[in-house]
Image: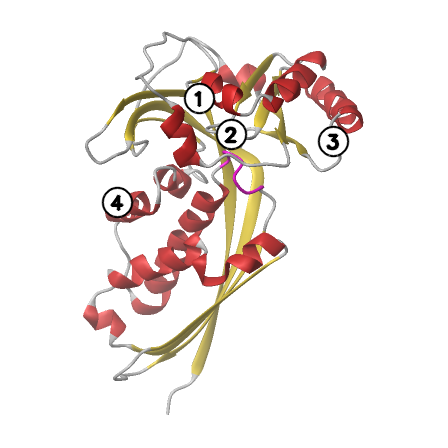
Amino acid sequence: MYFMTEAVYLERSPAKINLFLKVLDKREDGFHNLETLFQALELSDHLTFKIDFEKGASENLDFSLEIDSNSAEIKALGDKNIIAKAIEIYFAHLNSETLDQISSIYFKIYIDKQIPLEAGLAGGSANAAATLRALNKFFKEHFDFELEEKFLLELALSLGSDVPFCMLSTKSPRLYAESRGEKFKEKSFDFNFDDFQNLILVKPNFGIATAKAYALLKNADTHQANGFFNSFETVVFEEAPSLLDIDEALKSTGADQVMLSGSGSTMLAFYKDSDKCSQALESLNGILPKDYFIYQTRFLK
């Protein structure tokens, strides 16, 4: 006779922005080469993993997955959530010795969703990364099995180009990357990004699909920039000119820097002074549409 054991893991899932995003040539695999400086934010989702499991030999593993959230959009996704794919990929790489020790395993995952969807803030990627981290902790603790970080990052890349950084963001909140965004390198910048660590995010009432944003890019970016930069801005502003209204509103608050986040649709305003940032938030809540997501945050340290 076997007995159920319960394990609970809490994972922070920080949003990410690109302080510098240069899109280069298109690769043979259909993706683009990038040069980018990732930055994690204090804005985060929080995931609770409740795992009930039973040890013991069984011909067929009894498995179930339930995903709940404070977000109706996330609840509607059900098992189409990228979290389900992350679990599937992890289980596909469990060794047979570990699998043979499990007769049943039931996942109940709650997502306290704070990062808006289709915002260029990697909310889904961050959730997938948090799931891989939680699974590795669970199997190490209860089955003396874990995937090495290098291999785990390869699995993360198979889920999306931002997922490898999101895997590392809680311990390394700023990383320079090349290739698809998974090759991390040491690089120094003359520009001091930390002077602008107070920021406001504004996501309008529409999103922009990443694939569509890439399709709008015609040529590799050869722009030489020192500081905040995003290759997507010109083409995305042409596609969604209402973003220019947000750009103007942010600049009117005295923001020190304003830019598009990733492929959009979120706009970012950076401030040297935290009080000025707070005052800007109050002002923006009075002039921008009520259904816009407007949020004050800081760089994650």
Residue at (25, 44) in percent of width and height: 150
Asked if labels 1 and 4 touch by Cβ distance under 8 angstroms, the answer is no
Residue under numbered circle 3: 289
Question: In the image, which disc is placed on residue 154?
Answer: 4
Tell us which disc is closer to us: 2 or 4.
2
Is 182 on the left-hand or right-hand side of 119? left
Asked if labels 1 and 2 touch by Cβ distance under 8 angstroms, the answer is yes
Magenta stretch prevailing secondary structure? loop
Q: Give percent across and percent down for residue 165.
A: 38, 37
Q: Above or below — where is 6 with respect to 221?
A: below
Asked whether the viewer can see residue 33, the reply is yes
Between the residue at mark 2 and the residue at mark 4, the CA separation in whole angstroms equals 26 Å
Q: Earlier in the sequence, mark 2 or mark 4?
A: 4
Tell us which disc is closer to us: 3 or 4.
3
Viewer-proximal residue, 120 or 100? 120
Between the residue at mark 3 and the residue at mark 4, the CA separation in whole angstroms equals 41 Å
Q: Above or below — where is 259 with respect to 299?
A: above
